[in-house]
Amino acid sequence: MTASSRAYDVGVVGGGPIGAVAARAAAAVGARVLLVEAGDGSGEPARCAGLVSPRAWEALGAPSDCVLREIRGGTLLAPGGPTLHLRASQTKALVIDRARLNRDLLARAGGAGVEIRTHTRAVSARAGSLAVETHRREELPVKIVIGADGPRSDVAGFFGLPRPGRLLEASQAVLDSDAVAADEVEILFGEAVAPGFFAWAIPAEPGRLRVGLATTPGHDPRALLDRLLVERYPGAVIARIGGLIPIEPVARTVTDGALLVGDAAGQVKPTSGGGLYTGTLCGRIAGEIAGYAGLAGRSDAGSLDPYEQRWRAAIGDELRFGAAAHEALSGFCDEEIDRAFAGLNDPQILRVIEQVGDIDYPSRLVRAFVGKQQLWPRLFLLLQSLGGWPRFREAAQSLIAAGGLPIV
């Protein structure tokens, strides 16, 4: 083991988009920053469906050549046959080249002064020190470590922080196919398709289709995907990926000398499984707080706690609502999903969804329906057909806590 003579204010473990954002934010305040990435930094394989909101893209500040398509519509398919078709007048989502995005964000971090080491693993850490291994083991003086290393975060283990406990298992294939409209996605539900979540088909590069699904533990996502491909999406499989999706934030993201961000902190939208927007917001806060604290020589939990407070103030209520909504919706059987689709297949209801639906802030759709009193009778009947108020109480209470519903 060798010791490095260079000291760092901040060390970021994980070179994905969120780690790169956090590292650049720390460097922007003048901190000396090291980023270590176990892979080669290419972003391959891209463990992501690559569908983000225009808001997320703006937050990332990435170049336009990473955008493959603009999405304006979608078809939602229930297990028993009911279908909802949505079509908005504006772009609702962007399909991105996730690997290219990863490379661009790392390059920007490097341009901001971040020292980037690829093919380098973090092997241990404690307050004030980070041990890494490339060809040899090095013990580096690092005041604060940011864990951006996924839901099985090593940094969390090094510092005794909790890892995400609620996880989905996902599998995705890239097909040689153009079976879906160029500016639309397909979303499929059902116990035989993706128990506890949903499947997706997203057009990507010309002639390429990303088909994937996520499901609750205890099911085999690859076997479910294989069946879906055979039954609905024929085409040669070009590539496959798999991974875990956290769907609930951890209880604590800060301790002496370390903080967690992105998937490592469970900062993922439970209703969609997307984490780029939420992770980018939190990554900027993490980098700024860690950077200033490192420059001041303060690495205690009290000095880092503003990160915890700020990210929870920014997205905590929305994540709580999403987790409660996911819990309520994931328990639907196929017959209930069919009834829900039948109840939602109303021109006025669909128009509200098309206009207000927001993949980053799903609670805004509920708020919009609360304000449409003319739709209350239809929505009440739908609610009753799905088990009544008790089934959705937790999600509603989360929305009330966020100031989204009047307390009467």
Image (cartoon, helix red, strand yellow):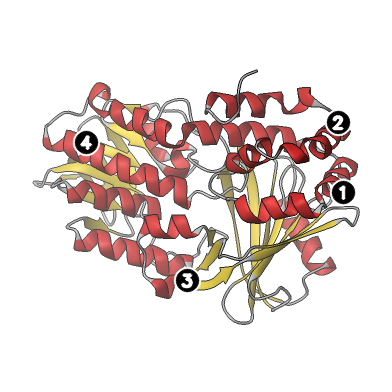
Dot 4: few (<14), some (14–19), or many (≥20) neighbours within 10 Å?
Answer: some
* 2 and 3 marks in contact (CB < 8 Å): no
Disc number for residue 342: 1
Q: Please give left or right for residue 373 compared with residue 125 in the image.
A: right
- From this view, report whether residue 88 is shown above or below residue 407: below
Amino acid type, callout 3? Val
Q: Quadrant of residue 87?
A: bottom right
Amino acid type, callout 1? Ala
Instruction: Give coordinates of residue 229: x percent, y percent.
Output: 77, 67
Q: Hey, which residue is sitting farthest left in the picture?
A: 5
Disc number for residue 384: 2
Q: Nearer the viewer, residue 377 or 314?
A: 377
Disc number for residue 67: 3
Q: Quadrant of residue 252?
A: top left
Q: Earlier in the sequence, mark 4 or mark 3?
A: 3
Query: How many angstroms separate mark 3 from mark 1 (CA)?
Result: 35 Å
Which residue is drawn at the image coordinates 30% and 26% (left, top)? 305
